[in-house]
Image (spheres, helix red, strand yellow):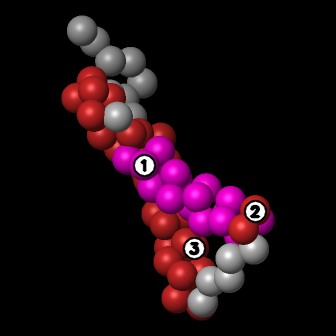
Amino acid sequence: MTKSLQIANIAEVSILIYTGVIYAIVAGYLIFNESYGWLSILGILLVIAGVIMNIIYDKKNKPLKESE
């Protein structure tokens, strides 16, 4: 993951980092029957909203063609 932070766009890599936490929580709920309070669910929704906004913002502000 450290090498990807050096090479790739930080916004794209950070999306993967934060969604990994959400996948772990969902797996804990489905496999281990864990329960979460409303603050945890609110946090999950905020992370998902942040990822979606980051994707939308990145697509709007990406140049059409990058020159080398």
Mark 1 is on which residue type? Ile
Q: Residue at x 58, y 58 (%)?
A: 24
Query: Where's the N terminus, which quadrant?
Result: top left
* Residue labelled with disc 2: 31
Q: Residue at x 68, y 59 (%)?
A: 27
Tag 2 and tag 1, C-beta contact below 8 Å: no
Span of residues in magenta: 14-30
Q: In the rendered view, does 53 fall on the left or right side of 14?
A: right
Mark 3 is on which residue type? Leu
Q: Quadrant of residue 38?
A: bottom right
User: What secondary structure is found at the residue carrying circle 2?
Assistant: helix
Query: Closer to the observer: label 2 or label 3?
Result: 2
Q: Residue at x 72, y 68 (%)?
A: 32
**Image height check: is 6 above or below 59?**
above
Q: Earlier in the sequence, mark 2 or mark 1?
A: 1
Q: CA distance from mark 2 to mark 1?
A: 21 Å
Q: Residue at x 50, y 59 (%)?
A: 21
